[in-house]
Amino acid sequence: MGYEVKTYDKRIKDNIRNYTLSNLYDMETIKKYLTNLAEMLEINILLTDRHGEKEIAVGDSFSSFCPDVEKEPGRKLRVQSRTIGHLYVKQLNTGRDECLMNEMVDGTVELLARLGEEAYLHRESSIYLEELEKQLEDRKHKASQNEREDILTGVYNKIYFENRMKIIDRSEVVPVAVMNVNINDWKFANDHFGDDESDRLIKIVSDILKEEAKPYFVIGRIDGDVFGVLIPMVEDGEAESYAERIQERCNTYEDAHLAPSVAVGLVYKTNIEETLEEKLSDAEYEMFNQKFEIKNAPGYRERLEKKLA
């Protein structure tokens, strides 16, 4: 996984996947507009998100309708060539001019697409400029040429990871999976094998975290043997699967000295009023609960001390 800052063009192309209808539109205003349109054209309207979840329904025609956005996508609402919503229409009065109705509905979809595009570009441009300003400020105060990456591991350093948390908070993206990943018994490795080997243990775990992550995961080293992981717009089961994979990779890692093992605390930010800093603290609490279970599990101590031989 690369951790270089994206170019503006690549950022605009990639980041639309993090946005929902409510991130781009004032949904109350959109509902009023669609209600007026439905009344004027004598139609019922349903607006769903990209996955088919109902967002706005005007009229009763779609009360028992289960959208299948793959087989029956309706009119696709697209921003940056990516579908972010689907519009379905049911004509109530067959005596009305159907061509006029379709023309006005298609025009509405086009209008919403343009408004969404403007909102998206404005928000991403603002965030991008804030990042550039922050980078310029950092350069004035840092002697190091590597301002973002942790030198040992190649993931984000603590300062930049915290900055990324603030940026995601400001973008009002939800849900976000928040993970605290702590190396079990790092001090044991340091006490018995020395600084070089304990550093290598940190590097082994960081490599596993990067190798099992997807490109949009945000990974940072937030303490000596602790990593933070953020997954914006996380899908169902995605974070749990990631946690299982990194723990399995650690538990099956073969090494002459080291026995990698991690405890993972996982929570979700689902409300834009919450902050990722708060959720990371909650994840740390969950991590300590799991650490207690792992370190008291049968076979854990034997695997750890076997390396002393």
Image (cartoon, rainbow, N blue to C red):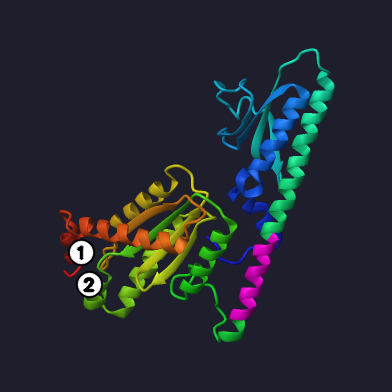
Q: Which three-letter amino acid code belongs to the residue tagged 1?
A: Leu
Nearer to the camera, 102 or 73:
102
Quadrant of the rendered image containing residue 191: bottom left
Q: Are marks 2 and 1 in contact (CB under 8 Å)?
A: yes
- In the image, residue 137 lies in the stretch drawn in magenta: yes
The residue tagged 1 is 304
Name the quadrant containing residue 291.
bottom left
User: Which quarter of the figure is the C terminus placed in?
Assistant: bottom left
Lower position in the chain sequence, tag 2 or tag 1: 2
Q: Is residue 262 in sight in this rendering?
A: no
Question: What residue range appears in magenta?
Answer: 125-138
Q: Which residue is mark 2?
A: 188
Residue 184 is labelled as none
Q: Is residue 193 visible?
A: yes
x and y percent of residue 24 in the render? 66, 48
Q: Is residue 4 left or right of residue 162?
A: right
Q: Is residue 89 magenta?
A: no
Observer-nearest of 40 and 105: 40
| 4 over 80 or under it: above or below | below
Question: Label 2 is placed on what type of residue?
Answer: Phe
